[in-house]
Amino acid sequence: MSTTALALTGLLLLFPIIVSYKEKLHIIKDLLVATIRAVVQLVILGYLLHFIFNVNQKWILLLFVLVIIINASWNTIGRASPVMHHVFWISFIAIFIGVALPLTGVILTGAIQFKPNELIPVAGMLGSNGMIAINLAYQNLDREFVKEMSQIEAKLALGANPKISSKATIRDSVKTAIVPTIDSVKTYGIVSIPGMMTGLIIGGVAPLDAVKFQLMVVFIHTTATIMSALIATYLSYKQFFNERHQLIGRDLLKEK
């Protein structure tokens, strides 16, 4: 692909920009910032991956995976409720476990090898899916605590502890976070054409082997998504209560 062709393709972004301006959606700034960031980050990533693939040092590979997890964790901070604290570390723990356990599993089973060209793309997908799930969980957790405030306080008044009183809120937050992943898996091969499987087939890999690899990715990214959302939610919900098991930030929540 030539640079000119890429630049002309980028003109397609004028459509959402025009629509945003006409409909007053106020997404032009976010769209432009996101696009510029994507360009810069992908250029840096391209050269960085080229370096890592050539060096092929295990400690550099592990460091790069850690950078992926840290970046994903950092990008969840803006989605959390103002009453929450230590958001980065909560997200880091959730994403780290969500990435580390599935990756360890597929390496031990021999599904993938401990090589940069196999480990990094999979780690990136796991970190990205975990980040998205946690963002959704945080947003819904905040929204549900506002929506169910009276019911939660009523349960607390009757002697229920924070976990029991907010059980429905926790469940809905986790469910909201993982539903997009489940819906995506449902449509594989019908609506969604997996890019990894298609790329492998184009690259000359036998169709069955490409399917196996894609299914492996589906299994581990679904697991990582659910684990990340579950851990982040259960580490977060208690922050909506004080040490006396009272719902905090009532006025702040009402302003939302």
Image (cartoon, grey):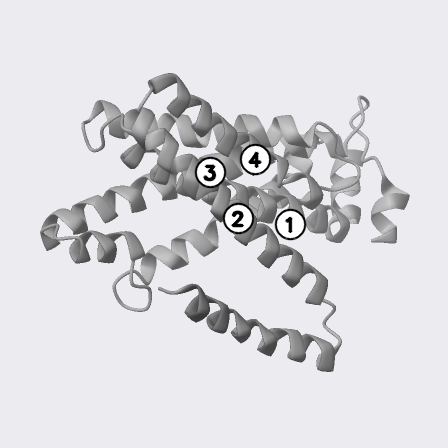
Few, some or many C-alpha atoms within 10 Å of disc 4 (few <14, some 14-19, many ≥20)? some
**Amino acid type at mark 3:** Gly
The answer to whether mark 3 and mark 1 are in CB contact below 8 A is no
What number is the disc on residue 153?
A: none
Q: Amino acid at mark 1?
A: Asn
Q: Secondary structure at mark 1?
A: helix
* Tags 2 and 1 touching, CB below 8 Å: yes
Disc 4 target residue: 71
Give the tally of numbered discs.
4
Q: Which residue is mark 1?
A: 140
In the image, residue 185 sits, relative to residue 78, either above or below, namely below
> Which quadrant of the structure image shows residue 108?
top left
What residue is shown with label 2?
177
Dot 1, crowdedness within 10 Å: few (<14), some or many (≥20)? many
Task: Please state the horizontal and vertical placement of residue 244, each as a whole percent of the image.
Answer: 82, 23
* Front tag of 4 and 3: 4
Q: Which residue is the extreme one toward the bottom?
A: 22
Q: Position of residue 82 (x, y in %)?
A: 79, 40
Q: Which mark is residue 127?
A: 3
User: Where does residue 120 sit, x and y in percent of width and height?
Assistant: 36, 35
Q: Is residue 20 above or below residue 236?
A: below
Pair 1/4: label in front: 4
Disc 2 residue crowd, few under 14, some 14–19, many 20+, Cα 10 Å: many
